[in-house]
Image (spheres, rainbow, N blue to C red):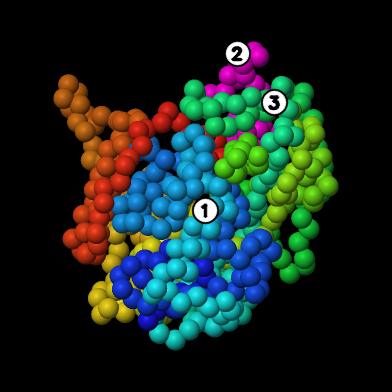
Amino acid sequence: MITVIGAGLAGSEAALAAARLGVRVRLYEMRPVKMTPAHRSGNFAELVCSNSLGGEGELQSKGLLQAELRSVGGAIVGAADASKLPAGNALAVERDEFSERVTRAVREHPLIEVLGEEVTAVPEGIAVIASGPLTSDALAADMARLTGSERLSFYDAAAPVIAFDSIDMDVAWRAGRYEQSADYINCPFTKDEYLAFFGALEQARAHTPHDWEKLEFFEGCMPIEEIARRGIDTPRFGPMSPKGLDDPRTGRWPYAVAQLRQEDREGRMWSLVGFQTGLKWGDQKAVVNLIPGLGNAEIVRYGVMHRNTYLNAPLVLESTLQLKADPTKLVAGVLAGTEGYLESAATGWLAGTNAARLALGLEPLTPPAESMLGGLTRYLASANPKGFQPMNVNWALVPELPAEINERTGKPRKLGKREKRPVMFRRGLGAFMAWAQDEAGLTVTPPPVREPEVVEPAGA
């Protein structure tokens, strides 16, 4: 028997990974008995920010991590594939359908017992702690006691969601960047419209922290108002970039663009890509209404800001996700120092697998360095602890390819991204599947691989 705390993406994946190895699991989830400021249901693996699990294909680091998880039957990526919505080369899902699929898989598994109560202290025995970004103060304090480490917090935010029938499609148009599939709605700005929008964004009132709060934002989920504070052109070179989007009325790129991505199966709700925000709701609506095509937008869910909690992973974690202070305790998800839905699920899978191995009397394992999951967990265990921030997967986490020598000059030949990343993708996936089969003793199924895309949409 092992214990899993939290039924978010990491905890749900951990519980199912351990149960697949024949180990009984006791899973604790405090919702809906005790809710958090960010969640709105009692379903497991609820997505509270974006509905995207990142870019797919051989050019994308998240594409490699998705493929690794698919090869071992990962529950979260499986539910995502079954709940997928059109989103160019991003793996976006219908939120409710996705979380309902995960909830059913967990609750119906005969080896998983679900207990609806809050855990306030680290339990005895083998346990996976995946209590997420809103870990309760009591449990966080006990984790700090156990690890002898400080508890760190930062803030992130969710983006507004807009009703489709309130979008003016005479102004906006559907397209993907660089002629990708037309899965995004694009709202084009002229220079004057952008300057008016930026001015309103500068003046809008943001969330005001209590005296005891210290607002520290994670770079990967920066509110649009914080991006704007870095300079007038920063948004339009970031989430509002017009690159690759030809306005059908002019045949040219606009001055700036706000993109919306489909949120539900029927296409009635669309979220603003890269527009996470902590603005007060009245000011938030005023700013959204200045986006061309959204002058009469109905906001069906306002953007919200919430606190995230995580450990200083390099000080307290092994690459197996075991705590250095107590190897019978494993940590996964945001609490372990990851950022992103997919990363949470992946570390949940590894923590659940290693917890089950401990229960079966086997040694815990770390995936190979060439794999994206192996690169991520090695980074968590070895990064510079000074100023540590949560990490998304990226190609810098895995080893570079050996240099190719130009036969004519005798010098190393520099490979472009489109040339080397598919090679790194296949190398990483092959190494991961061989490790999973030969060392971890798991059943492995080669996953389908999406062909490389030209470019990932901004904010995906």
Q: Is residue 217 visible?
A: no
* Upstream in sequence: badge 2 or badge 1: 1
- Nearer to the camera, 237 or 264: 264
Contact flag, marks 3 and 1 (Cβ < 8 Å): no
- What residue is at 33 percent from the left and 40 percent from the top? 449
- What residue is at 77 percent from the left and 40 percent from the top? 298
Q: Which residue is mark 3?
A: 169
Q: Quadrant of the N terminus?
A: bottom left
Q: Which residue is mark 2?
A: 251
What secondary structure predominates along the stretch shown in magenta?
loop
| Mark 3 vs mark 2, CA separation in Å | 17 Å
Q: Amino acid at mark 2?
A: Gly
* Upstream in sequence: badge 3 or badge 1: 1
Q: Is residue 325 visible?
A: yes
Helix, strand or loop for disc 1? helix
- What residue is at 42 percent from the left and 28 percent from the top? 454
Q: Amino acid at mark 3?
A: Met
Task: Characterize the local packing of mark 1: few (<14), some (14-19) or many (20 or more) Cα atoms within 10 angstroms.
Answer: many
Q: Relative to 60, is 72 above or below? A: below
**Mark toward the viewer: 2 or 1:** 1
**Mark toward the viewer: 3 or 2:** 3
Q: Which residues are magenta?
A: 232-259
Helix, strand or loop for disc 3? loop
Whether 236 is among the magenta residues is yes
List x then y, in percent, for residue 364.
29, 71
The disc label shown at residue 98, or none: 1
List x then y, in percent, for residue 160.
69, 45
| Mark 3 vs mark 1, CA separation in Å | 28 Å
